[in-house]
Amino acid sequence: MAALYCSCEHKRQIWGEFWWIGGKHEWMFFDDQEWSKTYTERLTHCPACGQRLEHKNLTMVTYQA
């Protein structure tokens, strides 16, 4: 599981999970923003900009203490 950001100007946070599907691993993306219309739904595109979600186009969330 990973918290990721879309690379668009909105920087929408996306929840990513690596699943075993059809004999291979694939990334699945979900909306984890409670205020969002698509909360808990599986996503294929960024809700903010419409860009297709691909792991290579997302950035990791980093936390600072």
Image (spheres, helix red, strand yellow):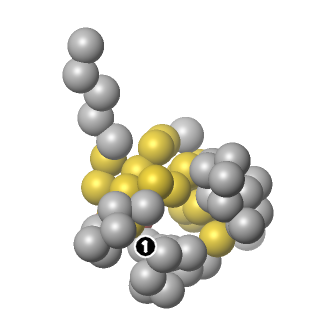
**For the view shown, which residue lies furthest in the top direction?**
65
Residue 19, percent across and down? 65, 53
Residue 10, percent across and down? 35, 68
- Residue placed at 67% from the left, 60% from the top? 36
Decide which of 56, 4 is in the foreground and name it.
Answer: 4
Taking the image as drawn, is residue 38 in sight? yes
- Residue placed at 48% from the left, 42% from the top? 2
Residue 23, percent across and down? 68, 64
Report the quarter where the C terminus lies: top left
- Residue placed at 75% from the left, 54% from the top? 40
Report the quarter where the N terminus lies: top right
Q: Quadrant of residue 41?
A: bottom right
Q: Amino acid at mark 1?
A: Glu
- Residue placed at 67% from the left, 53% from the top? 35
What number of labels is visible? Answer: 1
Q: Is residue 17 above or below residue 48?
A: above
- Determine which residue is flagged by label 1: 54
